[in-house]
Image (tube, rainbow, N blue to C red):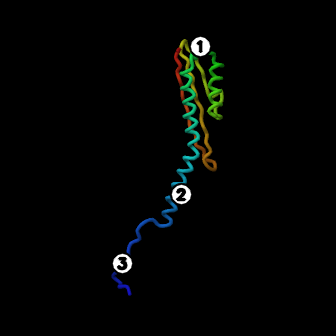
Amino acid sequence: MLKQGVKYKQQKGFTFVGWIVVLAIFLFFAYLAMVVTPAVIGDYTTDRILESLKQEPGITQKSKKYIWRLIENRMIINQVRNLTKDDFEILKEGDILTVYLQYDDKIHFMGNVYIVIERNKSVELLRN
């Protein structure tokens, strides 16, 4: 028989509801990572494509059409499908060639919620 003055031990640890909340938060961030990771990998790939133009011999003497074909071929090889010619701008000024890349990547998250990643990158190519 229990005495009236004795308190019961306090419960320690998580309750079932506490575990569900922690699991829901973990799953939310895991889903967010799964949705955003391909865009981050694509951004890294486009950076590599633009940086690889620096290694192209005589690039500053080539036409804009030729340079666009180089970029396009590298996008095909690296399976970059979300960029178009309109996302790039190629400017020639003397011995300096600058390639600009600007686009917005709109990623469907859930329902009517989207994640927009704004991307701006430029590469200056000097006469080699």
Residue 32: x percent and y percent? 55, 48
Q: Is 94 rendered above or below residue 20?
A: above
- Residue 7 is labelled as 3
Residue ID at (55%, 14%): 93
Image-quadrant location for residue 66: top right
Which SS class for mark 3?
A: loop
Q: Residues within 10 Å of mark 1 (few under 14, many from 20)?
A: some
Q: Counting other residues with Cα less than 10 Å from the Cα at mark 2, is it few (<14), some (14-19), or many (20 or more)?
A: few
Question: SS at mark 1?
Answer: helix
The answer to which image quadrant residue 57 occupies is: top right
* Residue type for callout 3: Lys
The disc label shown at residue 24, or none: 2
Nearest the eye: 95 or 75: 75
**Residue located 61% across and 42% down the image:** 107
Which amino acid type is shown beneath numbered disc 2? Answer: Ala
Mark earlier in primary sequence (2, 3): 3
Amino acid under disc 1 = Gln
Q: Nearer the viewer, mark 3 or mark 1?
A: 1
Front label number (2 vs 1)? 1
Mark 2 / mark 1, whichever is N-terminal = 2
> Which residue lies at the image location 58% right of the left edge and 45% below the top edge?
35
